[in-house]
Image (cartoon, helix red, strand yellow):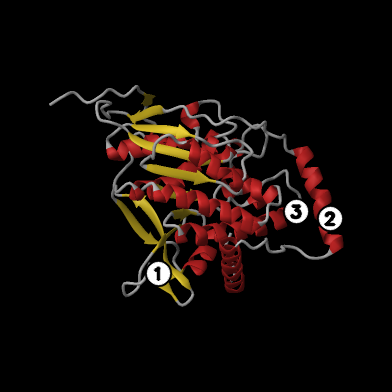
Amino acid sequence: MGQTAGEGVSRASKARKIATAAAVGGGGIGAIGGAAFYGLIVGESKLARRRIPQAEPTEPSLNGTTWAAQGVSNRRPPLELAVLGDSTAAGYGTQRERDTPGARLAIGVSAVARRPVRVTSAAVVGSESTGLIAQVKLLSAPPDLAVIMIGANDVTHRVKPADSVRALSEAVRELRSRGVAVVVGTCPDLGTIKPIAQPLRWVARRLSRRLAAAQTVAVIAEGGVTVSLGDLLGPLFDSQADLFSDDRFHPSAAGYAAAADAILPSCLDALGLRTKARSASTFTTRRARPVAKAAAHAAAHPGSEVTGAEIHGSSVGPRGPWARLRRRRPTGPVSGAPEQARPVVAVETQPERPR
């Protein structure tokens, strides 16, 4: 779903305000006014909670499983991938470990890098952004890449946006200080969730897109990269019922594969593996722009990547940091990716033999 020019400007302005409030320790920004309307939203929220089975919180799964695409030797040391965040990052609702986003991403990276990839998942079902720093501290050693997927619970639990963004900033800052490349899948568009009725669905869409834009502003400031998940799965959910898991709220294995496919190209680029980039839409260019504008556009265009940029040697302009809005894809086919229907196996990596 697109956005009007006015909506884009409004979302950019609010994203800047939320990110600024997070940086200076301010509170959240009110979202909806009117006591009567607020009461209606509270009532709809209670109904939604009855319709959607609640997932039981789980402990982090620091499993260290190593994956290799077909034909990849397990003699080379693996790349290290850490996955942080909430139930989406954990792959809640899948039946097999290989169907989780972490495994999907590892398989795709392995196919391109021609090396095994070890996944450490610290994601916790039900986690809010405030739980991210604890997940970061659980990592015993800095990985090569950290992928964060967070935000949905912040919206449904009515966490103040500034508090949510501040927590995400802290986690990204800590990872970057350790030399870790960071890719963040921003808050998905909760307006696509069927058990949520109107007008709550409209409110959920508005709040989740606003948070996604603010997340992007904050992540770019800390040296990370974001990829918009937006309503990426919405059209797919409408046409393919199998993209929902049994609870009708979390994605199925096919849904998680779609999300992983959107994030994978940015992961490859973050690891120094070649990708191709193009404009995020027919109406935008690859030139740098203020990060808030790029963030607002990305929130409404799933699959869009936002990265920091420079103009005339400066990374900051009169309206804040510069950013580029792009879409990426691998330079060649990703052998072993799900759509290729090629077998992928879990392996135990072997130490390299002395030369």
Q: Residue 5's spot in the image, x, y percent?
A: 57, 73
Q: How far apart are marks 3 and 1 (CA)?
A: 34 Å
Q: Which residue is drawn at 44% across and 66% down?
A: 282
The residue positioned farthest toward the right in the image shown:
36
Q: Distance between the residues labelled 3 and 2?
A: 8 Å
Please name the residue that numbered disc 2 is placed on: 40
Report the disc number at residue 293.
Answer: none
Please name the residue that numbered disc 1 is placed on: 285
Q: What element carries label 2?
A: helix
What type is the residue that disc 3 sits on? Answer: Leu
Q: Residue 164's spot in the image, x, y percent?
A: 61, 53
Q: Residue 107's spot in the image, x, y percent?
A: 38, 34
The answer to whether the residue labelled 2 contacts the one labelled 1, judged by CB atoms less than 8 Å apart, is no
Instruction: Name the foreground residue: 5 vs 237.
Output: 5
The residue positioned farthest toward the bottom in the image shown:
318
Instruction: Name the foreground residue: 250 vs 234.
Output: 250
The answer to whether the residue labelled 3 contacts the one labelled 2, judged by CB atoms less than 8 Å apart, is no
Give the quarter of the figure containing the C terminus.
top left
What type is the residue that disc 1 sits on? Answer: Thr
Front: mark 2 or 1:
2
Please name the residue that numbered disc 3 is placed on: 200
Q: What element carries label 1?
A: loop
**Of pointers 3 and 1, the one earlier in the residue sequence:** 3
For the question of whether residue 231 can be seen, the reply is no
The answer to whether the residue labelled 3 contacts the one labelled 1, judged by CB atoms less than 8 Å apart, is no
Q: Distance between the residues labelled 2 and 1?
A: 42 Å
